[in-house]
């Protein structure tokens, strides 16, 4: 009887401990849910940083120029543009001890500033309006810079420099078109409307800007290496795709209703002689592009493998872990290319290719996700699309350049809600392509490039 009592007491104690652990666990879950409810409640209100993830970076990067980002240079001395020279007189005696001073050298310091009220250049045309005595038709005088139809309600216009600055502010810098008139008015005093900027952009996109845009598209077809990526877009509220193509010489965008190999081949033809660096989109694996040498983005591949590895346990992780090690070894080898001899680099590249070929050999795996990785990545390796960056000079292992050129479009998408019509979409891709190409060359400002394009005769753009 005593043994039964003791046994029951131990069972009760164990049951109490189990219930105590359950209560503690439930209290912890209740506290977590309360915190989550509070975060959701606060998230529904206006926040200072609505897109913040709420996590601090453990080791944030320090401000300023980072090591290895090129030579550090001071601001250039604009002596040729100096309009006034002021002599800074030396003190009569040393401010520290009162001794006599002797001049050692002379330094030059400059201050570049804007006038308080900058005045635009206004050109007035005294146009002779005549009438023919024979036929009775009216004839107007002509002058350089004066449009033939610049009369009546449209007699007072802004010049190509103002419109070039307006388009540069909108398409190159990203200022919303509704704010561009205010910026121009604040800086120059020129009065302009939002509709005038929009209508001018669409008109020029069908003229010299459109012709220059076609020239940029042709340059991409002839480039030795091209990066491409895409993001979503909308035209009149309908889903569309914005595609970007980046080379060392130019950057080109296009907006289409669909993203198929037909749209890709508008820029990259099936007989393209260079290397196309892409993500894992199905459009690039079409049979029409089978003859194009490609390099699949290693960052996308590693992300796909990591997603599978994180879900696996035990032996099912081995395939993905080994594949990640081999892909990362390729990236490490590419970064060390400058520090290795040519023959050593080729030997290590050949060894890595053999290891990757053996790991991606055709076989049946027990895990379905691993089999999907083997089939998909193995097919790309069989086509030579994995390690081409180790074989061809100038080919990068990732498609980061394409992702970077899409960032301005993503920002514009948030601000302007994409394009209202097809003409607006065509104007957007033409102007942004010219602006990004001008930024890449960095020889002239975007405003100067656009102004030169506006005043260039039509026959100067003929091929």
Image (cartoon, rainbow, N blue to C red):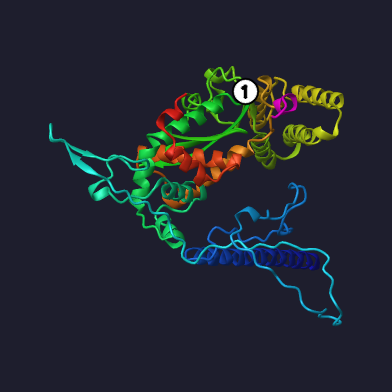
In the displayed image of the protein, which residue is found farthest to the bottom?
Answer: 98
Residue 435 shows in the view: yes
Asked which quadrant contains residue 19, the reply is bottom right
Judging from the image, what secondary structure is the residue with disc 1 in? loop
Asked which quadrant contains residue 103, the reply is bottom right
Q: Is residue 258 magenta?
A: no
Segment tinted magenta in the rendering:
388-394
Q: Is residue 462 left or right of residue 346?
A: left
Q: Residue 357: x, y in percent?
A: 75, 22
Residue drawn at the location 50% of the way across and 38% of the way down: 433
Q: Is residue 362 left or right of residue 455?
A: right
Q: Residue 269: x, y in percent?
A: 52, 21
Q: Residue 390: x, y in percent?
A: 75, 27
Where 432 falls versus 9 (above or below)? Answer: above
Q: How many labels sit on residues?
A: 1
Give the position of the N terminus as an image quadrant. bottom right
Of the pair 293 and 10, the residue shown nearer to us: 293
Q: Is residue 304 left or right of residue 448?
A: right
Asked which quadrant contains residue 240, the reply is top left
Where 247 falls versus 59 (above or below)? Answer: above
Q: Residues within 10 Å of mark 1 (few under 14, many from 20)?
A: some
Where 320 falls versus 224 (above or below)? Answer: below
Q: Is residue 393 magenta?
A: yes
Q: Residue 90: x, y in percent?
A: 76, 73
Residue 239 shows in the view: no
Q: Which residue position holds label 1?
A: 274
Residue drawn at the location 48% of the way across and 66% of the way down: 46
Of the pair 330 and 163, the residue shown nearer to us: 163
Of the pair 13 and 171, the residue shown nearer to us: 171
């Amino acid at each position: 009887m005593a043994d039964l009592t003791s046994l029951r007491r131990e069972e009760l104690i164990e049951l109490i401990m189990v219930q105590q652990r359950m209560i503690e666990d439930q209290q912890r879950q209740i506290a977590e849910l309360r915190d989550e409810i509070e975060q959701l409640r606060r998230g529904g209100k206006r926040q200072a940083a609505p897109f913040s993830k709420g996590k601090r970076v453990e080791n944030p990067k320090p401000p300023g120029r980072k090591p290895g980002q090129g030579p550090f240079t001071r601001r250039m001395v604009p002596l040729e543009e100096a309009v006034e020279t002021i002599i800074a007189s030396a003190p009569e005696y040393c401010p520290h001890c009162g001794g006599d001073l002797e001049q050692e050298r002379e330094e030059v310091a400059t201050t570049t500033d804007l006038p308080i009220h900058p005045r635009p250049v206004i050109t007035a045309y005294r146009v002779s309006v005549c009438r023919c005595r024979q036929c009775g038709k009216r004839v107007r005088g002509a002058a350089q810079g004066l449009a033939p139809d610049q009369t009546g309600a449209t007699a007072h216009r802004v010049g190509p420099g103002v419109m070039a600055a307006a388009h540069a502010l909108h398409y190159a810098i990203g200022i919303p078109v509704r704010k561009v008139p205010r910026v121009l008015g604040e800086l120059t005093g020129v009065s302009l409307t939002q509709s005038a900027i929009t209508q001018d952009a669409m008109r020029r996109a069908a003229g010299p800007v459109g012709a220059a845009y076609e020239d940029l598209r042709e340059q991409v077809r002839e480039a030795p290496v091209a990066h491409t990526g895409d993001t979503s877009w909308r035209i009149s509220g309908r889903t569309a795709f914005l595609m970007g193509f980046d080379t060392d010489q130019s950057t080109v965008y296009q907006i289409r209703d669909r993203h198929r190999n037909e749209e890709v081949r508008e820029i990259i033809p099936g007989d393209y002689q260079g290397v196309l660096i892409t993500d894992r989109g199905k459009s690039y694996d079409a049979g029409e592009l089978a003859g194009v040498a490609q390099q699949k983005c290693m960052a996308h591949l590693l992300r796909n493998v990591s997603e599978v590895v994180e879900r696996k346990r035990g032996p099912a992780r081995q395939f993905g872990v080994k594949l990640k090690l081999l892909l990362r070894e390729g990236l490490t080898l590419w970064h060390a290319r400058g520090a290795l001899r040519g023959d050593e680099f080729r030997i290590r590249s050949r060894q890595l290719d053999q290891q990757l070929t053996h790991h991606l050999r055709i076989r049946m795996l027990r895990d379905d996700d691993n089999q999907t990785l083997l089939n998909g990545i193995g097919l790309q390796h069989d086509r030579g699309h994995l390690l081409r960056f180790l074989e061809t000079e100038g080919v990068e292992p990732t498609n980061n350049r394409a992702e970077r050129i899409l960032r301005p479009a993503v920002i514009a998408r948030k601000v302007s809600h994409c394009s209202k019509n097809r003409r607006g979409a065509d104007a957007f891709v033409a102007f942004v392509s010219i602006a990004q190409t001008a930024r890449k060359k960095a020889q002239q400002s975007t405003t100067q490039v656009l102004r030169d394009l506006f005043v260039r005769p039509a026959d100067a753009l003929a091929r």
